[in-house]
Amino acid sequence: MTTLAEAYAYCDRVTRTEAANFSYGIRLLPAEKRSALSAVYALARRIDDIGDGPGSPAEKTAALAVARADIERVSVDSPDPVLVAVADSARRFPLPLSAFGELIDGVQMDLDGVSYATIDELERYCIRVAGSIGRLSVAIFAPTAPPQAARLADRLGLALQLTNILRDIREDLGVGRIYLPTEDLETYGARLVLQPDGVVADPDYRVARLIRFEAARAERWYADGLQLLQLLDHRSAACTGAMAGIYRRLLRRISRHPGDVLRTRVSLPAWEKAIVAAGNVVGVRQ
């Protein structure tokens, strides 16, 4: 049988190893909240890895069904350390465990090859895969937060996920995925084509202009979603601000130099992430 200490230690290792940006914020939390958020991350990571890992779509769909069943019967008596930590966290905080089911629905959309004709359709996907984690996090940050906290968490999730989409345009094309709405591609006359050398062709800068348009949309979502910080205690606000601040700074870099994401993976150096995190501790707005 896995002890609670062992379960949380396992989730902490997963978070520190796999969540580079996430870890800058989570370390700002007090121990109890940090442990619970690590448990949420570890389970969310497991679900994401099913979608991104090896296996046929049918095999992955079956694995997602197992994950869904696990969530419905999480228990501290489980031999699985992640499920033990999540079950204990759900006893200490009002975790909406159904949000993990929404995440599974979003991963299934990827497996089904769903594309997005409109921004409304893309928003539904983003809320499933990112807003869901935001709502789980808010339950840990502020268990008695007012109802609008969940809406703001969804808006922040939209901003974070669109940032990911813009950063990963090239990689997603490599596995046959296009997330940007068809209506936006058509408006800008942009075609997403991956060349043999792994670069996205953009001879007339139509894709670059589209990226800047989407980045401006994400900025509006950040401005809305970051109102959540006003509903959180100082350390929870610092954690959320650090994570969102890192992604927002990345978004601004992409907006300034949109061609970079068409050639390589864009990221922030560790020193810059640390500056963003430190700024949030002392209340500096990023």
Image (cartoon, rainbow, N blue to C red):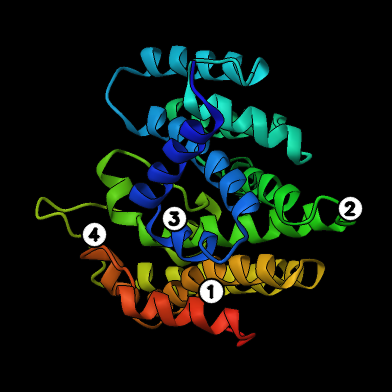
Mark 3 or mark 4: name the one nearer the start of the chain. Answer: 3
Residue 222, given in percent of the width and then of the height, sits at 63, 70
> Label 2: which residue?
147
**Residue shown at 59% from the left, 62% from the top:** 159
Disc number lying in front (3 or 2): 2
- Inspect the image, locate mark 1, and give the three-letter code of the amino acid beneath it: Gly
- Inspect the image, locate mark 3, and give the three-letter code of the amino acid beneath it: Ile
Quadrant in which the C terminus appears: bottom right
Disc number lying in front (3 or 4): 3
**Residue shown at 37% from the left, 13% from the top:** 59
> Label 3: which residue?
165
Q: CA distance from mark 1 to mark 3?
A: 17 Å
Q: Secondary structure at mark 2?
A: loop
Mark 1 or mark 4: name the one nearer the start of the chain. Answer: 4
* Position of 26 relative to 278 (above/below): above
Q: CA distance from mark 3 to mark 2?
A: 28 Å
Q: Dot 2: few (<14), some (14–19), or many (≥20) neighbours within 10 Å?
A: few
User: Could one spot residue 194 in this view of the protein?
Assistant: yes
Disc 1 and disc 3 in contact, CB within 8 angstroms:
no
Q: Which mark is residue 245?
A: 1
Q: Dot 3: few (<14), some (14–19), or many (≥20) neighbours within 10 Å?
A: some
User: Could one spot residue 114 in this view of the protein?
Assistant: no
